[in-house]
């Protein structure tokens, strides 16, 4: 790690955060603080430019660094957080890249990974830069690793507009191939696919084929969001110099200036995104991190939560009503958060002979609830908000069919295949 007086400095007060529920997008429970604020990749669509993130200066030029981030992460690791709860550590976000060009000089991300490598956890990492290849030796020390790259187009000219400071699309796909050869899990975040640019059929088809050829185990497409203010203004300015003919389309799509950055509802571009999910499903390519992957680095209770979140989205994109499923998801989330909070308050101490004691206790409770269902199958479930008195999975979910489904996942190790929406039990 190299210090540099020319780089604006920030102080990391904490290094690793843990939530009461896992992150369905990254499929992790813990999140490591990025060493950087701002990003020299300078992506035209980057959400990090939005005012809500309070980034001082010019977003892609005045990149600040947390030189003490590895120390903060080490402190949190030494306090034993990772000895209590199993749950992969997520590294990366949509507002900064931990492998942006400054990392080649400062190596703050590498130092952070080195402090986390011996925690016994898995690692989930997202980037647009081939610099991650430098750290494959450190990633191999984690229990397991999921390497994700963002690729939005194969068109190098368009990539130069959308992601001027990132590695080329071909180089990023080569990272996926190298990750698979190194024994890591790997997939592509194909987002955002931009209307009139990368979201068109020929462009997306070529992208998906190249991702598949690289060995990607999943491709998650996503649409563009433009928050009103700096993010939207920057993107529209970049677009005006590249494809001014598309300005009316984007002006209409984002005319409502929603705080979330979402386009207006009922537009044809949203229908195109639904089509891409269908195309990938029909080809057998998962459109989210597969259940078979994240169950390797999450505890069973957390993997069930992510599975329910993903199922709600997957069925929703196919036009299936998910109201009852989402109600059961909310009830399960309430139970999981309450149980985890109660266990954390017990101040369980880590023990070298008992890895992840809190996870062991939480998993035992879930298995017990699932086991009770078969004995109570003829009795009505206890509906209502008092989940704290639940004695079976039915009591929590208030959905007998879903309880039976999850019983196979919890008790028999069944895996849910996303493209076919089918459950299989390994022999």
Image (cartoon, helix red, strand yellow):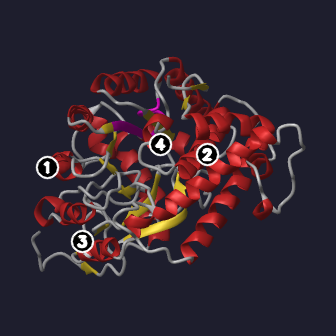
Indicate whether residue 324 is drawn in magenta.
Answer: no
Position in image of residue 239 (x %, y %) = 40, 45
* Secondary element at image label 1: helix
What distance separates the C-alpha of mark 4 from that of mark 3? 28 Å
Please indicate whether residue 51 sits to the left or right of residue 404 in the image.
left
* Label located before the other in sequence (2 or 1): 1
Of discs 4 and 3, which sits in the foreground? 4
* Label located before the other in sequence (4 or 3): 3
Indicate whether residue 195 is drawn in magenta.
Answer: yes
What distance separates the C-alpha of mark 2 from that of mark 1? 34 Å
* Secondary element at image label 2: helix
Report the span colored magenta: 186-199
Where the N terminus falls, by quadrant?
A: bottom left
Position in image of residue 273 (x %, y %) = 55, 32
User: Badge 1: few (under 14), some or many (20 or more) residues near its Cα, within 10 Å?
Assistant: few
Kindly identify which numbered label has been placed on residue 254: none
């Amino acid at each position: 790690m190299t210090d540099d007086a020319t780089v604006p400095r920030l102080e990391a007060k904490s290094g690793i955060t843990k939530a009461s529920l896992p992150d369905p997008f990254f499929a992790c429970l813990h999140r490591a603080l990025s060493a950087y604020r701002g990003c020299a990749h300078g992506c035209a669509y980057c959400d990090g430019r939005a005012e809500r993130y309070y980034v001082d200066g010019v977003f892609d030029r005045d990149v600040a660094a947390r030189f003490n981030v590895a120390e903060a992460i080490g402190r949190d690791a030494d306090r034993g957080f990772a000895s209590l709860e199993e749950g992969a550590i997520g590294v990366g976000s949509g507002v900064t890249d931990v492998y942006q060009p400054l990392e080649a000089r400062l190596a703050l991300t590498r130092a952070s990974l080195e402090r986390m490598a011996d925690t016994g956890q898995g690692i989930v990492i997202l980037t647009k830069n081939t610099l991650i290849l430098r750290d494959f030796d450190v990633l191999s020390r984690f229990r397991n690793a999921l390497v994700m790259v963002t690729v939005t187009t194969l068109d190098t000219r368009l990539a130069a507009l959308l992601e001027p400071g990132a590695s080329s699309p071909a180089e990023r796909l080569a990272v996926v191939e190298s990750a698979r050869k190194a024994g890591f899990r790997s997939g592509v975040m194909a987002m955002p696919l931009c209307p009139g640019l990368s979201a068109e059929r020929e462009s997306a088809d070529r992208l998906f084929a190249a991702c598949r050829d690289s060995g990607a185990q999943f491709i998650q497409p996503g649409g563009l969001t433009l928050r009103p203010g700096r993010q939207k203004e920057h993107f529209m300015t970049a677009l005006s110099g590249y494809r001014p003919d598309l300005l009316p389309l984007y002006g209409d799509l984002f005319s409502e200036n929603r705080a979330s950055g979402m386009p207006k509802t009922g537009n044809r571009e949203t229908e195109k995104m639904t089509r891409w999910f269908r195309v990938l499903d029909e080809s057998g390519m998962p459109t989210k991190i597969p259940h078979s992957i994240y169950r390797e680095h999450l505890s069973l209770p957390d993997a069930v939560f992510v599975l329910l979140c993903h199922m709600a989205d997957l069925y929703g994109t196919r036009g299936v009503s998910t109201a009852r499923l989402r109600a059961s998801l909310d009830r399960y989330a309430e139970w999981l958060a309450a149980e985890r909070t109660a266990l954390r308050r017990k101040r369980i101490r880590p023990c070298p002979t008992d890895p992840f004691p809190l996870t062991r206790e939480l998993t035992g409770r879930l298995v017990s609830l699932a086991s009770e269902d078969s004995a109570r199958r003829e009795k009505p479930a206890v509906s209502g908000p008092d989940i704290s008195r639940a004695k079976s999975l039915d009591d929590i979910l208030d959905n007998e069919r879903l309880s039976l489904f999850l019983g196979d996942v919890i008790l028999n190790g069944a895996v849910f295949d996303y493209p076919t929406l089918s459950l299989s039990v390994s022999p």
